[in-house]
Image (cartoon, rainbow, N blue to C red):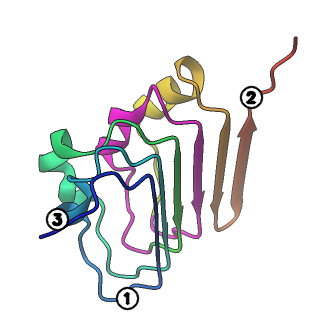
Amino acid sequence: MQVCTSLRFLNIDNCGGLISLLPILKFLTTLEALIIENCEKLDLIEMEDNQDDFPTSLRALRFIGLPQLVAMPNWIKRSANSLQILVIESCPNLTAFPEWLTFILTASGLNKLIIRLADCVYSFTRSFRT
């Protein structure tokens, strides 16, 4: 499989038959922004066993309209030091968040967190004063 290993931005939208990112994502070591929208069959948890192959340089991550997302993927932790924006919207089966998300909120460089799930909206924006 030929993959552009220097890719920095990837937007995957309306890929109804996509079930896994594993064959591609592990080669994208310089990826900084990943946006995944409206992929009904995509299972991000099935990639957990191979998380050592995943990018550690993600700065922005957006999950929108992913009904198969039932838990936050642990491979996100690999980008804990670089992640600045995390957006989760319209993922109706996501009902709980892991403890490591607290670390990303408090100890990392995360500047913006938006979670919109059914009746719940949570927004976090870190402000900097000089």
Give the residue at the far bottom of this rendering. 16
Is residue 99 at all visible to an observer of this figure? Answer: no
Local SS, label 3: helix
The quadrant the C terminus occupies is top right
Q: Earlier in the sequence, mark 2 or mark 3?
A: 3
**Which residue lies under the disc numbered 2?**
126
Q: Nearer the viewer, residue 111 or 56?
A: 56
Q: Nearer the viewer, residue 3 or 64?
A: 3
Lower sequence index among marks 2 and 1 = 1
Question: Is there any visible trace of residue 6 in the rendered image?
Answer: yes
Residue drawn at x 72%, y 38% is: 124
Quarter of the image with the N terminus is: bottom left
- Residue highlighted by disc 1: 16
Q: CA distance from mark 3 to mark 1?
A: 17 Å
How far is disc 2 from disc 1 in space, using C-alphas? 35 Å
Q: Vertically, is 1 above or below 40?
A: above
How far from the left and from the top, in percent, is residue 81?
A: 45, 25
Question: Is residue 53 shown left or right of residue 90?
Answer: left
Residue 29, horizontal then vertical, whole percent: 28, 44
Q: Amino acid at mark 2?
A: Arg
User: What's the amino acid at mark 3?
Assistant: Pro
Is the residue marked by circle 2 packed among few (<14), some (14-19), or many (20+) residues within 10 Å? few
Residue 81: say if magenta.
Answer: yes
Q: Horizontal and vertical percent for residue 105?
A: 57, 28
Mark 2 and mark 3: Cα distance apart in space: 35 Å
Residue that protrudes farthest toward the top in the picture: 130
Binning the other alpha carbons within 10 Å of mark 3 as few (below 14), some (14 to 19) or many (20 upward) gives: few
Q: Label 3 belongs to which residue?
A: 23
Give me the residue at 87% from left, 15% from top: 129
